[in-house]
Image (cartoon, rainbow, N blue to C red):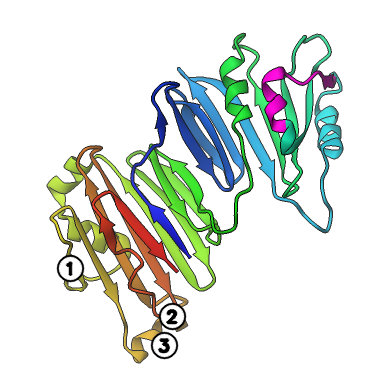
Amino acid sequence: MTGPISSPIEQIDNAMNTTHVGWNGIRLTVPRSWTLHINGHTHLIFEKDFQPLLEIRWQIPDSRKPATHQSMLRKLQKQNNDIEEKQIEEKLFSLKKHYHIFCYGKKETPGPEGGILSCKTCGKLILFHLNQCDKNLAAPLAALSSLSCHFLQEEPHLWSFQGSDLLLPSTFILHKFSFRPGFGCLSFRLKKLDLHCSRLSPADIRLQNQSLQEILAVLSGLSENEIKNGRTDLSCGGYRYPSMTFQVLSRLKRQKPFIRASIQHDPDNNTLFSMVAESTQPIPPEICIPNQPEYETVSI
């Protein structure tokens, strides 16, 4: 099972000036000028010039109590009883192949303010909201028409954050995330393994105060003598294969004793990108080992 990691890598359609964006099983194509705000595990907001244009929420199917677009509509109507069904916009017709579509809006509003998509394949429910302050809805509707929410099992998931893109096998489950100025971190879990992927900027300022090895030591908990230089001065990595005594003590403290970590410097984008894997079992050496200057492969 493999999945590539890059930081940052954007698949840009120069003719349309768009970029692919993904988060937790959702993927769509949006204008490059838009700003992505991640508000939760299943909540995205897109803005341009500090004005919200498109909001997307989604719900993972629950086999015990499956939600429907009717039940979601009832919840919306409880919040605002002025909502009614609206005609589906022509730009969304391409979604009919994969989704059941329901559009809604206020009675006095001519067009839809939002809608509900129900995936015919995975059952995922997706709620979208359009900002009516922007009279030209062509771009938000075009972005929605590119939306997809299910992929082949072996196809990696795309995670976009703070201008970087991350591709991981779909078996990695998002545990938590944190975004602060100059530092973003996504933490994933796969059975007994935790994987922390971090983006740090600006790299030049950080490297004035600490070396690449020192920064990785802080992020990973490895000692500096456990970290080795990479093939170039733009990367380094390290690992910990602890003694049995250390393993027992770590488990008593509910810590994961096995660690593999790497960090790469991307001078073109003035960023650092690190990966730290922690586990209660030995970690395969392929994890966190740079494969190419701008491309890494994770194998689990």
The residue singled out by tag 2 in the image is: 281
Q: Position of residue 183 (x, y in %)?
A: 35, 45
Badge nearest the viewer, 2 or 3: 2
Q: Which residue occupies the foreground of this view, 131 or 267? A: 267
Badge nearest the viewer, 1 or 3: 1
Q: Secondary structure at mark 2?
A: loop
Task: Determine contact: label 2, label 1, CB under 8 Å.
Answer: no
The residue singled out by tag 3 in the image is: 248
The residue singled out by tag 1 in the image is: 228
* Image quadrant containing the C terminus: bottom left
> As shown in the figure, which amino acid type bears the numbered disc 2?
Gln
Q: Residue at x 38, y 74 (%)?
A: 284
Q: Earlier in the sequence, mark 2 or mark 3?
A: 3
Question: In terms of image quadrants, where is residue 236?
Answer: bottom left
Q: Position of residue 52 (x, y in %)?
A: 55, 22
Using the numbered discs, state the Cα–Cα distance from disc 2 to disc 3 in whole angstroms.
12 Å
Q: Earlier in the sequence, mark 2 or mark 1?
A: 1
Using the numbered discs, state the Cα–Cα distance from disc 1 to disc 3 in whole angstroms.
26 Å
Question: In terms of image quadrants, where is residue 114?
Answer: top right
> As shown in the figure, which amino acid type bears the numbered disc 1?
Lys
Q: Position of residue 190 (x, y in %)?
A: 52, 67
Label 1: how many Cα within 10 Å (few below 14, some 14–19, many 20+): some
- Residue range of the region highlighted in magenta in the rendering: 83-95
Q: How many marks?
A: 3
Q: Residue at x 84, y 28 (%)?
A: 77
In the image, taking residue 23 as reference, residue 206 lies left or right, namely left
